[in-house]
Amino acid sequence: MSCIVSRSRPMLLRGTLTTFRRRCGKATCRCATGEPHESPALTFTESGRTKTVTLAASEVAEVTAALAAYEAARAELEAAAQAGLVKLRNRRQGGSGSEGGRR
Ligand SMILES: [Zn+2]
């Protein structure tokens, strides 16, 4: 078990990287005249609701990598699950069929 802990795993994130636009509300700010503040943000669904986390510009690269890492890990998991299914099916077809009564 310790091998999993000691291995430095990349951060994983699920969601979409977007640009969040908002007006801060200050009358003297440039956003009051029509140019809203733009900041990178991560949107994701949690418990069926869409949520947004605004990001610092310095975090964008890290978040992008974390999103890619999640996609890669998910694709790997999907492939492994598909391989397991193929294995199970091959076992059914390869056997004599005496146990395959339930359908
Ligand atoms: Zn503003």
Image: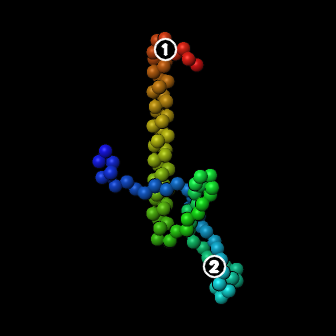
Taking the spot 47% from the left edge, 49% from the top edge, the residue there is 72
Q: Position of residue 74 (x, y in %)?
A: 49, 46
Question: Could you tell me the amino acid type at mark 1?
Answer: Glu
Residue 47 in the image: above or below residue 20: above
On whether ligand 1 comes within 8 Å of the CB at mark 2, the answer is yes
On whether ligand 1 comes within 8 Å of the CB at mark 1, the answer is no
Q: Secondary structure at mark 2?
A: loop
Q: Position of residue 67 (x, y in %)?
A: 50, 56
Give the mark count.
Answer: 2
Quadrant of the rendered image containing residue 36: bottom right
Residue 24 tag number = 2
Residue 99 tag number = 1
Please, which residue is most extreme toward the front here? 47
Q: Position of residue 7 (x, y in %)?
A: 32, 52
Taking the spot 61% from the left edge, 76% from the top edge, the residue there is 37
Residue 96 in the image: above or below residue 70: above
Quadrant of the rendered image containing residue 52: bottom right
Residue 18 in the image: above or below residue 36: above
Quadrant of the rendered image containing residue 45: bottom right
Q: Secondary structure at mark 1?
A: loop
Taking the spot 56% from the left edge, 17% from the top edge, the residue there is 102
Taking the spot 46% from the left edge, 41% from the top edge, the residue there is 77
Q: Position of residue 1 (x, y in %)?
A: 31, 44
- In primary-sequence order, the first of circles 1 and 2 is 2
Q: Is residue 49 left or right of residue 7?
A: right
Task: Give neighbour class at mark 1: few <14, some 14-19, many 20+ (Cα, 10 Å).
Answer: few
